[in-house]
Amino acid sequence: MKDKKFKQTITLMVAAVTFAGSLVVWLNVDANARAANSSRNSRIRAIRFLTHSSRSLWKISQERQLLVAYQEIGALKKLEQAYALMMTEPEQALPYRLAQERLQAMGGALKNMGKILTPPYFLLPAEQIDFFKFYLDLYYVPAMEQLQWQELQRKEAAFWTEKSEKYTLGVTILAVAVFLLTLSMTISGRIRWLAAGTGLSLVFTVIVFCVLTLLRSYQWPPRDSIRGFSLASGRMLQALNWKLASFFDQAAQASDEALTHLHRTLNRSPDYSAALQLRAMARSNRGEALLFGSGPSAESRLELEKAIADWQAAFKQEKADGFSLWNCGYAQFLAGRYVDACRSFRQALVLLPEQRFGLGINLAVCHLFSGQRGEAEKWLAESIRHAAAHPLASDPIYFRAAIANFGRFRELFPKSGIEILEMRMKEAFVAIAYLNRSDPIACAAELSPLIFIQPQYDSQGNVKRWLERADFSLQVPRVNYLYYCRNMQAGLQLVQKVYWRGSGMVLWREQSTLAKTEIWSGPPKGKFGWTVDFPLPGAGQGLAAGDFRVELFVQGKLLSSGEFRVR
Amino acid sequence: MEDEGTHEPLKIAISILIALTAVTGALISWQASRMGSRAASLDSDAIRAALENANTEMSIAADMAANQSAYQSYVLHRLNADILHDQFMNQPSLPSTTIDEWQREVSRANVYRNQLSQDYLRAGDEGEFFDADKFQQAMRAEAASQKPLDAAPFSAQADAQRRRLRFFVAMSVGLTAALFFLTLALQLPSTGRKIWTVVGVLLYGGIVLLTVWKSFS
């Protein structure tokens, strides 16, 4: 009788567990359906993003063509005006004036053909054109918004897939529980109670587990927050652009504007992890801009500390990816937390082994600043070796940015010994580009410092003598210089690199159009001359105002340099 | 012993009902599975439509750029030609090469005009203009007449299928509840047995009716 009662109870329990199991199956089906919907929507968003990108990039190229035509007409108009002014007789000037009229009308006609020649991108009276704003408005900000929607939809799909997997696990455990309960009906003795007890415990565990899973929900940020994120992304790109152009005040201002959008967004949606990461980036950018622009200060340090705090909060919300760790490490490095920065860079390197070039440079500087010079040189050599072996792992933009940053670090922290790394980077850049290897080829050549000279002409227009000087007038189309050399050999590769720093700029920017190279065919020693030439001398323009630095490399080795100024 | 003998037919009926419930559950699950497949197929259709739309938009953008470029050159050469002509008429002192230049400009304008999609070159208050909006609308309409370009209707249908799928699976859950009540009835003595049998039958009947109604709605 007791056995019958037991079996009846267990039979009922099995039926009840089957009912519970079917409920879990329903939850699983629901989660699966939501995951499928979100996954489809995410793919459609991705396709829309590509559609938007393609359409707007066509449009931008079309508007750029319009702009070029307008600028060409403007230049021709000025030329006609100059010719007209040169003529002494009105009849002689007439064709030029008429040409000017025609060009005026053509320029006017172009203004009606696109957005780029209308406000807010075209600002009168100076006819200043803000093409970057046009790019941001037409392409970048809407693209970021599409991409953000796609990303959020993808995350939603992943969320529901994870839930579905948990329910599947629940159903599987319930099946085991049913097996144990059924088993308890066919056996006797203590083991029967063990089987039944285990089965019931599993059922209880699954119920708790499924209820906890059910209570978790996916939070979509409001539409305004997504818009705010996209606008902030646009301002961040602007800040980056200013930073690359070495205008740090403007970079800090653009980062500030990004932060305004992001504070508002995060006030509305504190769990919006992408916005939190972007705020960390914006703070880091602002801190860097303040540091690079005006030197170390309490304000820059505070901003960088806030950036680090944001990164740490973001890593609690979402597992850190390689690029986030890299960015966090950079903020830690700028804030002077070298040990933390090295750790972040190493963690990033584990996740991003293909980024050995960039991360290696960061690790090198970080070790140098923390007093480990040997480690620093090891990492730099490793980074350069990687760049030489993997052409896709490095690019001229990154090389130039790293060299420019090294230059600024040298000015900000003079005793750091950074100049060795800076020189090594410059030589590696030349060796990889011109010699197809990671380091210079040893040679005995020696060069003196560069001597800049200016010709003095006689009344016939012939060069009377050369004057040594370091200042040249604005728009000078060519600057000559001399150097003494010895131990030169035929076939050695000579490379000239030129850097420029305009008024108000902090970083030296390499001027790739002023670079030159030649294979040595002269005698082993003597006095030689070379020039820094504006690429298009007949255009009536010349070198821009600012400081210029010229460097000469022989077989990839930096052997000489000099500076001059254009006022 | 007596009780069991009296209720033997009811027990058999309950057993048959249990079997029927299981078969109905299997049928509903089969329907639900078909809906899942249909929803997945509609998802693919939605993505295909989005891709077709992307392809169309990219073609339109490329054609638009070509037309705009031709239009820009056409306008500039035409304008230059017109002004040159006026200048030559008003300034007899101009050299005769002016008229040669005018002819060259007219020829160039003509070349670019021929590059344009002529249907969209319209006459306006300020002369001819290229109607870019109409051009794009026509290109889109032409593409849409050959293949679906809008993902939204397919997505909506897929969502609807998944809502039905959830409903059908919910009915399966209801059937397992009915199964539970019938099993309970089988285990209990006479009065309880009858009550739980009625509950089980009512639940089963309700679910079957709801499922049939939903299948044809």
Image (tube, grey):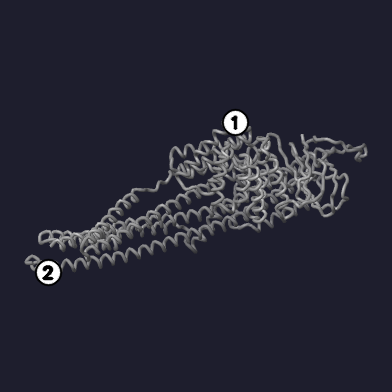
Residue B202 seen in render: no
| Kind of residue at badge 2 | Pro
Does residue A412 sit above or below A149 in this rendering?
A: above
Front in this rendered view, residue A381 or B77? A381
Frontmost of labels 1 and 2 is 1
The image quarter containing residue B168 is: bottom left
Query: Which chain does the numbered disc 1 sit on?
Result: A
Q: Position of residue A553 (x, y in %)?
A: 77, 47
Identify which residue is drawn at 85% across, 53% down.
Answer: A521
Query: Which chain does the numbered disc 2 sit on?
Result: B
Q: Quadrant of the C terminus of chain A?
A: top right
- Please tell me how crowded label 1 is: few (under 14), some (14-19), or many (20+) other residues with Cα within 10 Å: few
Q: At numbered mark 2, what does the secondary structure look like: helix, strand or loop?
A: helix
Look at mark 1 in the image and give the residue it sits on.
A297
Q: Position of residue A33 (x, y in %)?
A: 37, 57
Q: Position of residue B37 (x, y in %)?
A: 38, 64
Residue A366 seen in render: yes
Identify which residue is drawn at 61% across, 58% down.
Answer: B117
Q: At numbered mark 1, what does the secondary structure look like: helix, strand or loop?
A: loop
Q: Is residue B100 left or right of residue A347?
A: right
Dots 1 and 2: beta carbons under 8 Å? no
Look at mark 2 in the image and give the residue it sits on.
B9
The image quarter containing residue A464 is: top right
Q: Quadrant of the N terminus of chain A?
A: bottom left
Front in this rendered view, residue B79 or B2? B2
| Kind of residue at badge 1 | Ser
Q: CA distance from mark 1 to mark 2?
A: 93 Å
